[in-house]
Image (cartoon, grey):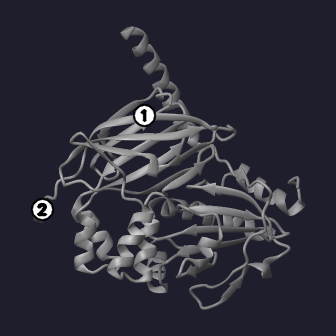
Amino acid sequence: MPVSIAEVVTGTDETAQLPFWELRTQAMTFRLIQRLPDQTRAYFAGRGFSKKDVETIAGYCIFQSVYTNTASANSQRVIEYDASQWRVDYNNTEQSLVLREDWRRIWEVKGVNSAQKIAFEWSLLPSRQRYQATDYNWGMTVYKLPHGAQFNLKLSWTLNGEKKQAVIKNIHCAKDIYIPPTDN
Amino acid sequence: MKRFKKIVLLVVYIVSVSSQGAIGQESLHEVTGHPTAADFSLLDLDDNTHTLSAYRGKVVIVNFWATWCPPCRFELPAMEKAYQKLRKEGVVMLGINVGEDADVIFSFTTDYPVTFPLLMDSDSKVTQAYPVVGLPTTFVIDPQGRIIYRAIGTREWDEHSLIQKVLALKKNQVKD
């Protein structure tokens, strides 16, 4: 599979004010924005999850993720990905992302109610997607890694049917820190 | 070799940045085969039932969204502006909320007021009947009830070119 000519840009996301890693190629961008475990706790508590289930989710390493077909409006470039093919490289071992399909099984075992399952499912980046010019999605991606872990993400996709791949290196999971309130 | 690699990366970067700038251009993608839109009956926030087939003969824009979805929030003001232009032309716009209840949606509309109907797909059954895997996703349905266009992610719906594309469906200006 050809390795795509790509670069990875890192910095602080303007909106989240948290670190991001962005893969940029000629046809697409994929940005991972760190999410603090407390953000995740607040978000899913707000969707009605029990404290125990909230802690289950917050125990994972989670990124807000934005996948974009950057082609101009009239372009015929079509990008497709299947996140089940992506690999997480951590401590010299490879693993998959924890996708919508995995979570369906997790929530089934835990007996989570339908409304919560729906909220959770739609909050995640689609496991598979097809983007035409200017299409994009936001959604969380979930990694079974400890807080503070550093990993590489091997991505693959197709551009008009041609397989591509790239690696985003040295991504950092957020640490589970407590920021005390201030008087300001 | 290293110098060549640097030049290639520079070119890629320039192309990447310039093509990102192109996101401002708006596009609706034609759906292959123009499938018939799945019919639905859903309640809006005022307990009125909206049935898609009852709008047969009109162009209908169906937007799947949720309050927690940042791009959905970003898109709503432009949708409202577009609706103000399109409603005069008889175009229907329906926002289908995925999985949230009336209280959540109602309080959300304090910050994001819209005048087009917001429907509740509480069990996401209607959403699943459409080719939606991420939010927001929007479909434009022609007067014959066929899905003609689709957009994944936000669009500036009040942009002239999009408005014209939607209005063209009233005149059946899309090839079968």
Task: Tell me the chain of label 1.
Answer: A
Task: Tell me the chain of label 2.
Answer: A
Q: Which amino acid is tagged 1?
A: Ala
Q: Secondary structure at mark 2?
A: loop
Q: Residue furthest bottom?
A: B47
Q: Residue at x 56, y 55 (%)?
A: B153
Disc marking residue A178: 2
Observer-side mark, 2 or 1, equals: 1
The quadrant of the rendering that contains the N terminus of chain B is top left
Quarter of the image for residue A172 reads top left
Q: Residue at x 22, y 71 (%)?
A: A55
Q: Position of residue A36 (x, y in %)?
A: 24, 58
How many other residues sit within 10 Å of disc 2, few (<14), some (14-19) or many (≥20)?
Answer: few
Quarter of the image for residue B9 reads top left
Mark 2 and 1 residues: CB-CB less than 8 Å, in contact? no
Q: Which amino acid is tagged 2?
A: Tyr
Q: Residue at x 69, y 51 (%)?
A: B28
State left or right for residue A36 relative to residue B31.
left
Q: Position of residue B52 (x, y in %)?
A: 74, 78
User: Of marks 2 and 1, which one's residue comes earlier in the chain?
Assistant: 1
Residue hosting label 1: A166
Question: Could you give the CA–CA distance between mark 2 and mark 1, rounded to whole angstroms?
Answer: 34 Å
How many other residues sit within 10 Å of disc 1, few (<14), some (14-19) or many (≥20)?
Answer: many
The quadrant of the rendering that contains the C terminus of chain B is bottom right
From the viewer's side, name the closer residue of A62 and B174.
A62
Disc marking residue B78: none
Q: Secondary structure at mark 1?
A: strand
From the viewer's side, name the closer residue of A22 and A58.
A58
Let me know if marks 2 and 1 both belong to one chain: yes
Q: Position of residue B65 (x, y in %)?
A: 54, 68
